[in-house]
Image (cartoon, rainbow, N blue to C red):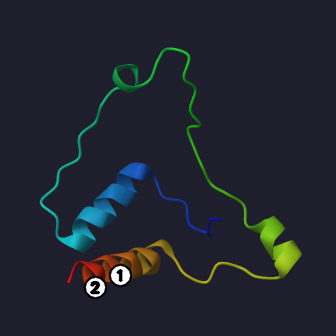
Amino acid sequence: IGGPEEVSIINLAKKIIKKTKSKSSLEFVPYKDVYNKNFEDMERRFPSTEKIFNYFGIKPTKGIDEILDQIILDINSYER
C-alpha cells in the first residue's frame, strides 16, 4: 500500500546492499536500452495512505528500514 517515507530506487538498492552486506554493485542501464520509444514511466511513486486510513482507520506502522530488516530475516530463515 505504501507508507509515510519516500525512497528512490537507487537509495532502496543501496539500503538493501548495505543491510545484506552484499558485494553487488549498481548498474545503470539507459531507458532506451530497456524500453521502447513509446514507454512512459512516472518519475515518482509516492502512494497516499489517506484512503485506507479513512476507510479502515489504520496507518502504516513500520518504516522502510524495519520492513527491509524483516524481509531479510525471513529470507535468511527460509534459506536454512
The three-letter amino acid code for the residue at tag 2 is Ser
Give 78 or 65, whichever is nearer the viewer: 78
Element marked by disc 2: helix
Give the labeled residue for mark 1. Answer: 74
Q: In which quarter of the image is residue 1?
A: bottom right
Q: In which quarter of the image is residue 3?
A: bottom right
Question: Crowding near pointer 2: few (<14 within 10 Å), some, many (20+)?
Answer: few
Quick check: 36 left or right of 56? left
Give 40 or 4, whichever is nearer the viewer: 40
The three-letter amino acid code for the residue at tag 1 is Asp
Quick check: 74 left or right of 56? left
Against 62, residue 39 (above or below) is above
Seen at 44% across and 81% down, the residue is 66
Q: Position of residue 56 (x, y in %)?
A: 83, 79
Q: Position of residue 10 (x, y in %)?
A: 36, 50
Against 25, residue 62 (above or below) is below
**Residues tagged 2 and 1 counted as in contact (Cβ below 8 A):** yes
Question: Crowding near pointer 1: few (<14 within 10 Å), some, many (20+)?
Answer: few
Q: In which quarter of the image is residue 75?
A: bottom left
Residue occupying the far right of the picture: 55
Quick check: 56 left or right of 68? right
Against 40, residue 4 (above or below) is below
Seen at 32% across and 65% down, the residue is 15
Give the labeled residue for mark 2. Answer: 77
Against 34, residue 8 (above or below) is below
Seen at 56% across and 66% down, the residue is 5
Between the C-alphas of marks 2 and 1, the distance is: 5 Å
Q: Position of residue 27 (x, y in %)?
A: 23, 40
